[in-house]
Image: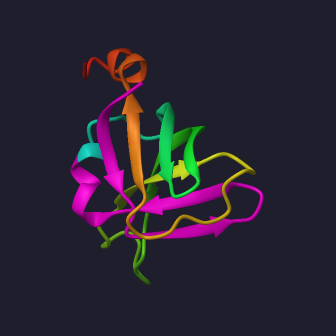
Amino acid sequence: MPSQLLLVVETSLHLPGLGLLAISSAHETSLRRFPIHANLEVELHLAAGSLTVPATIEELHRGPDAAADRAEYVLLLASDAVTELPAGTEIWLSDTWAAVYNLA
């Protein structure tokens, strides 16, 4: 059962062969609680119902000068079942995974 709202999707980006980036600048702080490349299992709240998928915390650089650019923390969903996420989709973290990272 989900326990913590991790983020609400602002935009998403499909990366063929890698997965789907879920991006939300408003919820980036909640992602920064985790180390880069942290493995998670998250629950997507979609119009058709909930779906649990594996994910990792990643960094995204958006400028031409990546060294001067502040990296955004984003969530990479590693599931072929999800190829896009509408804006407003909620992504939740379960009690189990919150406990793994001492966030429960």
Residue depicted at 39% across the width and 33% down the height: 93
Residue extending farthest bottom:
64
Q: x, y percentage for residue 53?
A: 60, 38
Any magenta on residue 7?
yes
Question: What residue appears at the point 30 percent right and 73 percent down from the top-left corner?
Answer: 68
- 37 is higher (above) or lower (below) than 67: above
Q: Quadrant of residue 2?
A: top left
Name above or below for residue 80 compared with residue 25: above
Query: Which residue: 68% across, 62% down?
Result: 83
Q: How many marks?
A: 0
Does 50 appear above or below 95? below
Magenta residues span: 1-29
Q: Is residue 35 magenta?
A: no
State which quarter of the image contains the C terminus: top left
Is residue 54 or residue 1 the one in the foreground?
1
Left or right: where 30 falls relative to 16:
left
Residue 57 pos. (x, y %): 45, 44
- Seen in the picture, residue 92 relative to 45 is either above or below; the reply is above
